[in-house]
Image: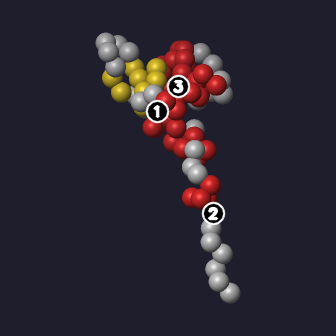
Amino acid sequence: MDNDVLEAIRTNLTVPVWPTAGQALGFRTPGAAFAAARRGAIRTVEGMGRKKLVPTAWLRQVLCLDRATTTDHHLKRETPPG
């Protein structure tokens, strides 16, 4: 994934269906990304006018990006005494 796309997903509340969300989800064309948004495969919220925006919280969850930002202490397990 492109660093600019990743940065936009991590720092904004929403991103456009194309190019940001579509490219992050692996769509190769704007038409494919917008078709996926129309059928509900890409979650969207209404933007200004006809613009469709994708909530980045949903996008980070789908792309498993929240796990990458979890701190190490959340991943460690304590060993049982014994």
Above or below 70: residue 39: above
How packed mark 2 is, by other alpha carbons closer than 10 Å (few <14, some 14-19, many 20 or more), is few
Q: Nearer the viewer, mark 2 or mark 1?
A: 2
Disc on res. 8: 3
For the residue labelled by badge 2, is the local secondary structure a helix, a strand or a loop? loop
The disc, 2 or 1, on the residue closer to the chain's N-terminal end is 1
Q: What percent of the width, then of the height, locates residue 52?
A: 39, 20
The disc, 3 or 1, on the residue closer to the chain's N-terminal end is 3
Residue at (52% x, 38% y) in the render: 60
Give the CA distance from mark 2 to mark 1: 27 Å
Give the CA distance from mark 3 to mark 1: 9 Å
The residue to which callout 1 is attached is 56
Amino acid beneath label 1: Thr
- Say whether residue 72 is visible: yes
Q: Nearer the viewer, mark 3 or mark 1?
A: 3
Which residue lies most toward the right here?
82
Residue at (35% x, 13% y) in the render: 50
- The colour scheme applied to this rendered structure is secondary structure
Which residue lies most toward the bottom here?
82
The residue to which callout 2 is attached is 76
* Quadrant, the C terminus: bottom right
Q: Are marks 3 and 1 in contact (CB under 8 Å)?
A: yes
- Say whether residue 39 is visible: no
Amino acid beneath label 2: Lys
Above or below 74: residue 2: above
To which quarter of the image does residue 54 belong? Answer: top left
Amino acid beneath label 3: Ala
Q: Are marks 2 and 1 in contact (CB under 8 Å)?
A: no
